[in-house]
Image (cartoon, grey):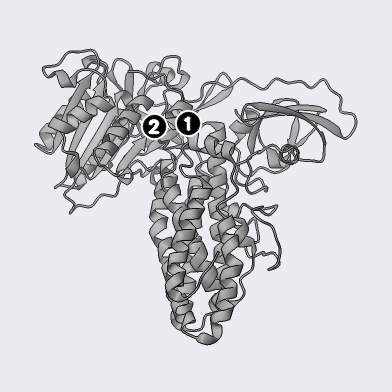
Amino acid sequence: MARFHELTVTDVHKTIRDAVVVTLKPANGAAQDFDFIQGQYLTFRRDFDGEELRRSYSICAGKDEGILQVGIKRVEGGAFSTWANEELKVGDTLEAMPPMGSFHTELNPQAEKQYLGFAGGSGITPVLSILKTTLAREPKSNFTLVYANKGVNTIMFREELEDLKNLYMGRLNVIHVLETDAQEIDLFTGLVTEAKCAELFRHWIDIGNVDTAFICGPEPMMLGIAKALRDHGLDDALIKFELFASAQPGRLKRKAASRDAASSANQATASITLDGATQSVTMPKDMSILDAALQNAMDAPYACKAGVCSTCRCRVLEGEVEMVANHALEDYEVEKGYVLSCQSFPVTDRVVVDYDQ
Amino acid sequence: MAEDMSIERYLEAGGILSNPANVPPRYRAELMKLMATFVDSELAGAAGFADIINAAPGLKERIAAARIVLEKTDHAERVLKVMGEFGADTARYASHHPWTARLPRDADIGTTRSEHDMRLAVFNYPLEGWSDAVVMNLLMGRAVGVQLAELAMVSYQPLAEAFRAIAPREARHAELAEEGLAQLVAEPAGRDALRASVDYWWPRVAASFGAADAAKFAALKAMGLRRTTGEELRTRWAAEARAVLKPLGLTAG
């Protein structure tokens, strides 16, 4: 299982009003663990009022810059991103897991490829890492970026992209599409939809020559672009996606403790929710929650039945269970009430569990 | 920008997910089941085939069998790595179960899985010698080809990519079996045994496409984890497998 390492903040600067670029240096000899691939992300954890939050942010640095850098855009009501934008400062320590993700393709210095990237708002971060690395490591390849934003003021890394265009003269093409600000060419105003893409592909971008397309942005934008790419003949295997949903799971409420029932006999009642339906079952306390669900014809998920794979994860909302083995869930998940149902036996006379949470 | 789309609607519309950070709980569970089924089947398949290496008639055949064992184990590892990103203990997973365990040859378990692992039912039956293993590997290899074409389109991109990388090598395993079978049918003495093996494995491989469950299929389809029903896949496999057997003078089903 991946482990968290400490990283020291060596620089924090604003790229636009609502987003910071944070430079990090692995502490305690963990540098090797953070040797990332372009387009990967880091998962951070931090305690907010006694509850651990985890958030993933893409690395925006290129492989050859020799730094580890992420971009964090403030999300309305987002505890982590607000904290990073308002309070994080040089010298602070962050905890993150080693880089993960497969939003990249293999690079080859001999290749002469045409790459096409689509980024929506803060979706630029992994695409920036990819385009910087690609332009540096594949001297014969070109990159076209279609970059969607609300207006000129909300374009992250605008100047950096201009500098890159100058540095890689003729090899980087950036098309800014702005939702609200009018531009000289009408086509570049509005949302990047399927129809907008179709127009772009007619006049500006030759899909027939594209070797790989990268898309990172909000869900509707990704769907529209992917559909347009497929309709214009790009194979699924050549389209790379990265989605960080605008709604990463928010703060979870603590499980309601009901420790009233002094346990009596060996029997317990379990209320089990799966796929929106709830069944109440009576079960012996030496039976696992999973087996109780299966015996009552519920199609509860499981695989290894040995506490190893975590397929059978569910959440305890009421009552208490004893989890006899756990090789898969982490402490913060357990604190939130998640258990491996194949390893969990009722302790209280009544338990309420949910597979849908 | 309109950013108010739920993950469920995104998936229904054909959306692709790329990391564990935002998969919904039920999606996570079905994805883990799908991966565990593949990993367990590969591990059980490789374990069963490992015993067959010693039964291979020549060096070339030994190499082919050893290669199949090696690559199926490697394929299990690739998909297990994706499970690991969801928290599965990958080191413990490989050894938590005796993958060589088999039921008696005449056990009748239909499509039910064993109590303790997720391998497809077909991998619970024992192989009986070299020619039986070649027949099983051919029929199942063609089934894996049909399944992987479907699985390479799953909505979880890291897994879809793993399957796309695995598919050509699995296809090669079926080709090796086809080459092996072509040699075996040339010996008139062994034909009856080959026919018996085809009759034995055909219904068991056919059952690996699962029983029809329309509600379950609809749910998986909405999540982008399935596109084609098991029945359609089974029909596709049966046609392909018959076409391979026919020139070898074998018929089935």
Which residue is at the far right? A265
The answer to whether one can see residue A62 in this image is no
User: Residue A58: x and y, percent?
Assistant: 36, 33
Q: Give the quarter of the figure containing the C terminus of chain A.
A: top right
* Along the line of sight, the residue nearer the viewer: A42 or B111: B111
* Label 1 CA crowd tier, 10 Å (few <14, some 14–19, many 20+): some
Q: Which mark is residue B22?
A: 1
* Along the line of sight, the residue nearer the viewer: A70 or B56: B56
Residue A352 figure quarter:
top right
* Label 2 CA crowd tier, 10 Å (few <14, some 14–19, many 20+): many
Residue type at numbered disc 1: Asn
- The chain letter under disc 2 is A
Query: Is A104 on the left-hand or right-hand side of B44?
Result: left
Query: Is A334 on the left-hand or right-hand side of B32?
Result: right
User: Residue B115: x and y, percent?
Assistant: 70, 52
Residue A291 figure quarter:
top right
Could you tell me which secondary element the residue under label 2 belongs to?
A: loop
* Along the line of sight, the residue nearer the viewer: B26 or A319: B26
- Against A149, residue A1 (above or below) is below
Q: Which mark is residue B242?
A: none
> Could you tell me if the residues under marks 2 and 1 are in contact, i.e. CB atoms within 8 Å?
yes
The answer to whether one can see residue A188 in this image is yes
Residue type at numbered disc 2: Leu
Could you tell me which secondary element the residue under label 1 belongs to?
A: helix
> What residue is disc 2 on?
A243
The residue sitting at 59% across, 45% down in the picture is B212
